[in-house]
Amino acid sequence: MIALSTGSLYTYGLARVFELAAEAGFDGIEVLVDHRWDGRQPGYLRRMSADYGLPIPVIHSPFVAQVPDWPDDQLGRLRRTVELAQAVGAATVVTHLPFRLYAIAGLWHGYRSRSFFLPLPLPRREPYYHFLRDGRVTELEAEAGVTIAIENMPSKRVLGLKINGYWFNSPAELARFPHLTLDTTHLGTWGLGPVAVYERLREQVAHVHLANFDGREHRSPPNGQLPLAKLLRALARDGYAGAITVETAPDALDAADEAECLSALRRALAFCREHFD
């Protein structure tokens, strides 16, 4: 199944994302829980799924704390997302790794506004860290009847240096988890090849976030320096049966113009179908 993440077009309303995904020919939708109320109301999601003939195989737990009426802590967000997945019949929940450091994030208002991220040298071990470290994710999977796929995370650059802001964020450490979401653009930030990492972790890869990297994250799959065609062929060779989700940034899909966006979605989907056959 080739799905489209609602996060790829977070600047659009949810119904518009479903409409464009259906028109482009995608097989399903991955719902990212974010600021949009529509994306966390089970009845509405089931209606959108039925209206556009697009199943929802995956729900992505929110990766920011400021989501109205959603828990602020990572473990609470995961548990609430699992409940949402059960309510809409999604088989997989994507969740990020636990934060390793405290940090100050903000927006600099100068000649050009820029966001900034300043890590603090204070180790961060919240309940979510212990939940994953102690292997309790398997208990939640068994209890809820869903697959919880832990996502590898990108590097952050501070003063030109790569910073790892997450616990367990290396291929060797990720091997501890029973199920993984392989995020290709995040691998690109570390200079890691997606095929090599997939070959190492293939037994645990239950879900794929497909996006390219050209120095910027979340480019459309055909556009960038990562060998995504080779990865798709490797997945097809191995009989991979999970969802492959196109997860880009809105500008990578020309979201400023709806007609151009639809064309970009079709190109991304055609690329996936060509190589995952």
Image: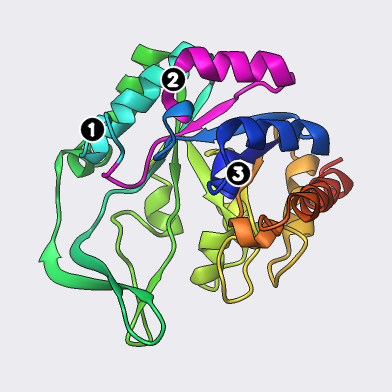
Q: What's drawn in magenta, residue-wise?
A: 39-66
**Residue identifier under label 3:** 208
Instruction: Point out the frontmost of discs 1 and 3.
Output: 1
| Residue type highlighted by circle 2 | Gln
Left or right for 251, reference 161: right
**Residue identifier under label 1:** 71
Q: Residue, x 75% and y 29% (percent of image)?
A: 27
Residue 127: x, y in percent?
A: 15, 39
Q: Nearer the viewer, residue 93 or 190?
A: 93
Mark 2 neighbour density, 10 Å: few (under 14) some (14–19) many (20 or more): some
**SS for dot 1:** loop
Q: Is residue 45 magenta?
A: yes
Vertical comparison of 96 with 87: above or below = below
Q: Which mark is residue 149?
A: none
Vertical comparison of 153 with 182: above or below = below
Instruction: Point out the frontmost of discs 2 and 1.
Output: 2
Q: Is residue 59 magenta?
A: yes
Mark 1 neighbour density, 10 Å: few (under 14) some (14–19) many (20 or more): some
Q: Residue, x 86% and y 47% (percent of image)?
A: 270
**Residue identifier under label 2:** 41
Instruction: For marks 2 and 3, give the CA distance.
Output: 25 Å
Mark 3 neighbour density, 10 Å: few (under 14) some (14–19) many (20 or more): many
Vertical comparison of 158 with 130: above or below = below
